[in-house]
Image: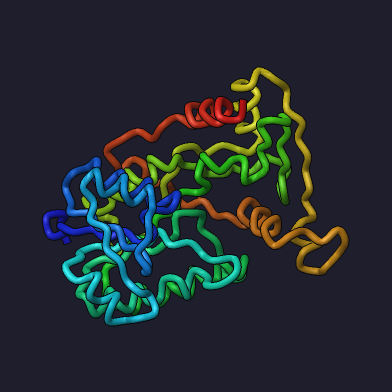
Amino acid sequence: MSNSQFKTVTIAGGTGTLGYAIAEAFLNDGSYIVKILRRKPENENEKAKLLASKGAEIVYADYSQHDDLVKALKGTDVIVSALNFDPKGAGFYDAQAPLLAAAKDASVKRFIPSEFGGKFKPGAHPLIDDKIKLGQEVEKSGLEYTYIYIGLFQEYFGWLGFDIKNKKATFLADDGSKLFPTTSLSDIGKYTVETLKLPEARNAHIYVAGALLTLNEYVELFEKATGSKWEVVVDKDVRNRFQNNIEPVPSFLDNFKAMIVQEGEIGELDNDKFSFTPRPVTEVIEELVKQAS
């Protein structure tokens, strides 16, 4: 499937953190008609307004109504799913399965599922198993597909345990010596756009990273950016305590963070297949430090 056969791209979840970055990248590229699929009921959303002002078409659908979703997706060549799981509701499978079913009936050509993280083995975590279940359905659907693995969003270092205000890093399940891929949101958008122009990305798993460093090396970059020595706390027993209900029992979220660090697999990077050099992680770190000050 050549790039010329892809004209219209619909982004599900395009007003979320990840989806917005992907939508901006497609709009900046200028090669595609860009649609943002939002859930009904229609409501005011600043990011949707911004994307519309840049040329995106905002379309609405009731995800619980198959025919409504099919109607919204008619004319779409590529669906990019940036849908997240709902901690109180639908997981990655339930959030995306209606979209996939509608894509088949709307004659969509390619489906890019909401991977955009690390690569993990089955059984690593229920959320990962949910993604794998969806992936199996994608591959059986007859649609083309591309999985894009990027590691951690660099803008989410704080979420992972890098506390800029207190100059403290908390490592869960690792002493900081394991390589850990990270990528900026803007580059994730660019990589996603370019997969449509990359023959090798058809029915493929693509591994990219803006930086591939150890957690200790990331700490050194934060120390340089803040001009201060950081405290590092290591808790290697998070997953064991969570799985065996040992006090103090970690939260579901901390167990997930530990899994990301401990269980992540690093495939051979495909960076050299793309036309651009990713943004230096030092730039993102400097921005995060400024935001925290």
Residue placed at 47% from the left, 52% from the top? 267
Identity of the residue furthest to the right in this view: 247
Between residue 120 and residue 279, name the one nearer to us. Answer: 279
Residue placed at 23% from the left, 51% from the top? 56
Q: Describe the colour scheme in one phrase.
A: rainbow
Residue placed at 82% from the left, 61% from the top? 249
Identity of the residue furthest to the front in this view: 44
Residue placed at 45% from the left, 71% from the top? 95
- Report the side of 61 relative to 118 (left or right): left
Picture coordinates of residue 290 (x, y %)? 56, 25
Q: Quadrant of residue 140?
A: bottom left
Between residue 188 and residue 13, name the one nearer to us. Answer: 13
Q: Which quadrant: the C terminus?
A: top right
Identity of the residue furthest to the left in this view: 4
Q: Quadrant of residue 68?
A: bottom left
The correct choice, above or below, for 272 with respect to 85 in the image is above
Picture coordinates of residue 278 (x, y %)? 38, 35
- How many marks do you count on the picture? 0
- Report the side of 246 relative to 38 (left or right): right
Picture coordinates of residue 90 (x, y %)? 52, 72
- Report the side of 71 relative to 214 (left or right): left
Identity of the residue furthest to the top in this view: 227
Q: Quadrant of residue 146?
A: bottom left
Q: Which quadrant: the N terminus?
A: bottom left
- Report the side of 54 relative to 259 (left or right): left
Between residue 175 and residue 186, name the one nearer to us. Answer: 186
The correct choice, above or below, for 89 with respect to 14 in the image is below
Picture coordinates of residue 281 (x, y %)? 49, 32
The correct choice, above or below, for 132 with respect to 202 in the image is below
